[in-house]
Image (cartoon, grey):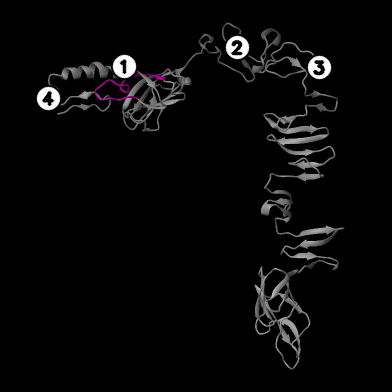
Amino acid sequence: MPSTASPILRIQLMGTGDQAGTWGDTTNTNLGSLLEGAIAGLASVSVSSTAQALVATDYAADQARMAIISLSVTGAVTTPFTVYAPPVSKTYIIRNTSAYDATIRNATAANGTTPAGSGVVVIPAGRIMQVWSNGTDFFKADTAITLSTDVTGTLPVANGGTGATTFSSGQFLKGAGTGAVTTAATVALASEVSGTLPVANGGTGVTTSTGTGSVVLSTSPTLTTPTLGVASATSVAAAAGAVSTPSFTATGDTDTGIWFPALNTIAASVNGTEAWRTTSNGDFGIGITPTTRLHVSSAPGSSCLSRFTNSTTTVEVGVSSAGGGQAVFGSTTNHLTRIVQNSTTQLQISTAGLVQIDNGYGSLATFYGCRAWINFNGTGTPAIRGSGNVSSITDNGTGDYTINFTVSMPDANYAAIVTSEYISNGTNIVLPSLYAAGAPTATGSVRVYTIPTGAGGGGMVDATYYCVAIFR
């Protein structure tokens, strides 16, 4: 029967009849080396990575079996590190000789660094601790002390205590140099305090002062009259400052505040960047040195908008980044937009989006503009002389044309005005008109033609000058 390793200390368990003539050597190794190491052995472990396993070897001396582990680190480890033990129950005394905290925990397998459980123990740098594991989690071996039941009497000054048992409200501990520390409510500065309280401890670091209104300004101070002081009975003087180092700032925020870029000029910086300034002539600029009474600028390619808001309406004025830069004036909410002259509204955009003007009418009225127009030669191949919102002309035959819109109308219920020069077909006068043989108006086009008047008939003719205007 072959030998096997014991589950916890990994010593060699010989099978019946195994190792004839050599079992004494194995027994000596088990008892004299392995068990002795597990009880009182010391392993010096040099840690070379932040996650390192204690070496575990069956039948032979190793790190993980030892009772005492002394940890040190190589130059490669400059931070706290973790040491992994095999997943078996074990007690260790661990000494951390390094300058970094060490954590001990169980791995899921011997010689591995995959955490088994959540229980860990941290051994601070330079400390010695006794720990134990149940095979999954590590615990401290010490027990807590209950002061109310386990400690009696008064800890004397000689042993780091106060020697006192009471401490009243408003008092502090005071020692006379010998005996117990007593409680007191005051300190006699003249007789009980000597030396100079340094700046690092809340003092001034000096024992004498000169001048009027002097203050301490440095960590190795002398008393001096500061630059920021009382210049007169009504003002305070300060250096001009700069955009990244304003004259007046809040504590801990030295690049945000007020400064003075020129005579009779004041500016404000935010995060080391100029936010606004007022020049000597009263011009005010936001993001720019102003050249007008109010001058606002933003970064290239971005919108520059001013916003005015009350509880129901928001109005924006400025330049939008859309389309390479567009002037903007209007409401971002569904409210009237008005232009007023002499306290009278002359133009407004209604909540329905309609433009309404007075323009001498006496009252506001919705402005219905020409949505499309054309002036063309209808003879031969029709040719456009001038147009607006017209993409092309379709020649349907003599004196019959379809005008095609670039942008369609919202519906076909618009008004079309059709005119032409004086035309005759030799029998009757021919008049321009909407096409009568079917629906002449469509959202994308309108059809017009010339029609003879009076008796006698005669056919349609092309007109040299033909004009059409669409209103909606």
**Residue furthest out toward the front:** 380
The quadrant holding residue 440 is: bottom right
102 or 448: nearer the viewer: 448
Is residue 102 shown left or right of residue 344? Answer: left
- Could you say where residue 413 lies in the image, as x and y percent from the top left? 69, 75
What residue is disc 3 on?
212
Q: For label 1, count other residues whose C-alpha is less than 10 Å away and answer few (under 14), some (14-19) or many (20+).
A: some
What residue is disc 4 on?
17
Which span is picked out in magenta?
Answer: 54-73
Separation of marks 2 and 4 at Cα, in angstroms: 78 Å
Which marked residue is nearer to the observer: mark 2 or mark 1?
A: 1
Q: Is 62 a magenta residue?
A: yes
Residue 182 numbered tag: 2
- Amino acid type, residue under disc 2 in the picture: Thr
For the N terminus, give its image quadrant: top left
- Amino acid type, residue under disc 1 in the picture: Gly
Residue 41 numbered tag: 1
- In the rendered view, would you say 423 is above or below 119? below
- Could you say where residue 403 lies in the image, as x and y percent from the top left? 68, 75
